[in-house]
Amino acid sequence: MKFTIRWYGNNDPITLPFIKQIPGCSGIMGMHDEFAAGEVWDKDFFKKMVDKVHNVGLEYEVIESINVHEDIKLGLPTRDKYIENFKQSIRNVAECGVKVVIYNFMPVFDWVKTDLAYELPDGSNTLSYDEKDLIGVSPSDFAQKILSGAGDLTLPGWEPDRLSKLNDVIEQYRNVTEEQLFANYKYFLEAVIPTCEEVGIRLAVHPDDPAWPIFGIPRITHNFEQLSRIVNMVDSPSNTLCLCTGSIGSDPKNNVPEIVEYFVKRNRISALHVRNIKFEGEHKFYESAHSTDAGSLDIYSIMKVLVDNNFDGYIRPDHGRMIWGEKGRAGYGLYDRALGLVYLDGLREALYKTKDERLKVN
Ligand SMILES: [Mn+2]
């Protein structure tokens, strides 16, 4: 498996040379907000980004920010134009060496947290979610709150131009059922997967974060049954998952190691985001340090399943806390993510070195 770190391109205070200094890190997962959902990714622009990454000796094989236009999710007649653009973007990034494209199919809201700087007893802070903070709050008021906590740095999924039309978009979803959303999703996959196969891209859906519907709008990528249905809708090695442990694991009913094992055995995981979370109650959790002991998820068992099945895709530590006085983009500072990567790489080494022994005993 290849260890990577998310990099926000020209807008990232965490520089590529800093990322290069993290032991065990071979590349980045790129997140660029230069193009709105539905726009074609310009090849020349993207090639320059890739060259920058290569120039410091890192790989650029995964991109996380080719977003699916809302009209595709809503199934509007205009979707075909945006699907064609998506396919062109896929071709363009493939020509620059990208192997995996992570996307999501969450209506309106990308990830949702209710506090971007939740204070922990040790003085660090982290992202957290508490359902009671959403009660009686309108989606647009909530969006304003999130944006005001973000400082000068952009947050993917919370771009101001996208949020300005928030109320209209939510209205459009009022009549969309889960089944319609699945049908729109299938239409999208049937259109784009052949292009992915042709150019050697694996498309990887990021699950709903958190793992339940928000503001009464349907969401369909947050449990085993839904993820199975998605990978079976178009049966192709290019139709895969980006298994985000903290997203899927936010619902305690989801057994994350079992879910990872099922899909990794079927070669349907091409990337993982690994983070731990700590449950504090029903629909209430915070993002903890990555280690098993720090949170509620068994990170060791997740890594074990990957090693025992020879997972050869991409993995990165997901959000980190803000520690040691660091300030920056919520979840995407340097220090705690670097600690997370080194911890995960340590588990990897130990698990590989004991693998033959362990598999013999079992
Ligand atoms: Mn994630």
Image (cartoon, grey):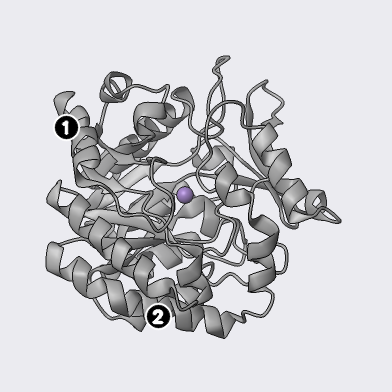
Q: Say if disc 1 is inside 8 Å of ligand 1.
A: no
Of all residues, the one furthest to the right in this rendering is 136
Query: Residue 135 location in percent, x, y?
Result: 84, 56
Task: Evaluate whether residue 324 shows in this view.
Answer: yes
Q: Dot 1, how many residues are within 10 Å of its Cα: few (below 14), some (14-19), or many (20+)?
A: some
In this image, 325 relative to 355: left or right? right
Which residue is depicted at the point 62% across and 61% down? 252
Which residue is depicted at the point 19% across and 41% down? 44
Q: CA distance from mark 2 to mark 1?
A: 35 Å
Q: Dot 2, how many residues are within 10 Å of its Cα: few (below 14), some (14-19), or many (20+)?
A: some
Image quadrant in which you'd find residue 325? top right
Query: Residue 240 location in percent, x, y?
Result: 32, 66
Which residue is depicted at the point 20% across and 33% down? 48
Nearer-N-terminus badge (2/1) = 1
40 versus 126 height, above or below: below
315 versus 360 height, above or below: above
356 versus 71 height, above or below: above
Q: Provide the residue designation for mark 2.
A: 186
Q: Quadrant of the C terminus?
A: bottom left
Q: What is the three-letter code of the residue carrying label 2?
A: Lys
In this image, 88 relative to 198: left or right? right
Residues at circles 2 and 1 in contact by the CB criterion of under 8 Å = no
Q: Provide the residue designation for mark 1.
A: 51
In this image, 71 relative to 143: left or right? left
